[in-house]
Every structure is written in structure tokens, then in C-alpha cells.
């Protein structure tokens, strides 16, 4: 958990002494993610077009708020900015992403 998560969990009454902070992130140069090929292709496409790259790396879960990411994409879209959106994380599928796009609440 990150420091913000530690604070919020402590506020809920969980004992700080039993918490361990594991910062978010991933090892650079490790190509064991199933999304690596798709992400590399998206980045290559963006580079070819000189487009902005906007990404989110998070498992598909309500706490990660993929719906807010989708809504944020309207900002560059509304200004005519060329961009490529990149999503990576466990649990993302075409079916649940489509459900997120057309739902009011995001993943359930």
C-alpha cells in the first residue's frame, strides 16, 4: 500500500504497526505482461503521429475508477488534441471495458 492508503486505512481503525508500504510500480525491462505488445504498438503509433500518450496502469476494479479515466479523455478530445489512450492491467477485457464505457458507475 502507498502512504495515502496507509493513512486512510489507519483512519478506519486498522493498526499501523501491522501495515507494510509497498509502493506502486513495476520493474522496468520486464516483458512478462500480456499487454506489453499492445502497449508498445500504441506507443509506436503515437510516436508516428506525434500524438499525446495518455495511459492508465491498474487492475480492473471499482477502486481504480476506469470510468473517470474515460471521462478525462474528453478533455484532449474536446480540444482537438491528437492522442492515443493506453490501458494496461489485469482483468481488463473488451467486454468489461465496453460495460464501463456505457455504464454510470464503472466496474462492479
Image (cartoon, rainbow, N blue to C red):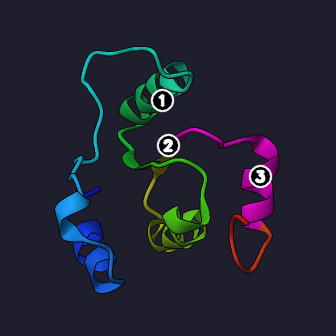
Choose between 54 and 7: the one closer to the eye. Answer: 7
Q: Reading the chain from its start, which is encountered first: label 3 or label 1?
A: 1
Q: How many marks?
A: 3
Left or right, 103 with respect to 38, comes to: right
Q: Reading the chain from its start, which is encountered first: label 3 or label 2?
A: 2
**Picture residue at 35% right of the left edge, 39% below the top:** 50
Figure quadrant of the C terminus = bottom right
| Residue 95 lies in the magenta stretch | yes
Choose between 20 and 92: the one closer to the eye. Answer: 20
Point out the frontmost of discs 3 and 1.
3
Residue 80 percent across, percent down from the top left:
48, 65
Residue 106 percent across, percent down from the top left:
68, 70
Figure quadrant of the N terminus = bottom left
Q: Secondary structure at mark 2?
A: strand
Q: Secondary structure at mark 1?
A: helix
**Picture residue at 58% right of the left edge, 65% below the top:** 70
Say which mark, if any, is on residue 96.
3
Where, by quadrant of the figure, is residue 103 drawn? bottom right
Evaluate if marks 1 and 2 touch, with contact meaning CB atoms under 8 Å apart: yes
Residue 71 percent across, percent down from the top left:
56, 73
Q: Secondary structure at mark 3?
A: helix
Question: What separation in Å lies between label 3 and label 2 (alpha carbons)?
Answer: 16 Å
Question: What separation in Å lies between label 3 and label 1 (alpha carbons)?
Answer: 19 Å
Mark 2 surroundings: few (<14), some (14-19) or many (≥20) residues within 10 A: some
Left or right, 27 with respect to 69, comes to: left
Say which mark, if any, is on residue 86.
2
Give the magenta-colored segment's residue range: 87-101
The residue to which callout 1 is attached is: 39
Amino acid at each position: 500500500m502507498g502512504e495515502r492508503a496507509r493513512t486512510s486505512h489507519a483512519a478506519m481503525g486498522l493498526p499501523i504497526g501491522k501495515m507494510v508500504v509497498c509502493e506502486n510500480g513495476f520493474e522496468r525491462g520486464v516483458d512478462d505482461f500480456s499487454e506489453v505488445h499492445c502497449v508498445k504498438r500504441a506507443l509506436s503509433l503515437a510516436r508516428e503521429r506525434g500524438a499525446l500518450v495518455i495511459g492508465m496502469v491498474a487492475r480492473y476494479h471499482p477502486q481504480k475508477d476506469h470510468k473517470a479515466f474515460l471521462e478525462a479523455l474528453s478533455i484532449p478530445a474536446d480540444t482537438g488534441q491528437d492522442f492515443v489512450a493506453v490501458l494496461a492491467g489485469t482483468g481488463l477485457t473488451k467486454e468489461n471495458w465496453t460495460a464501463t464505457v456505457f455504464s454510470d458507475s464503472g466496474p462492479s
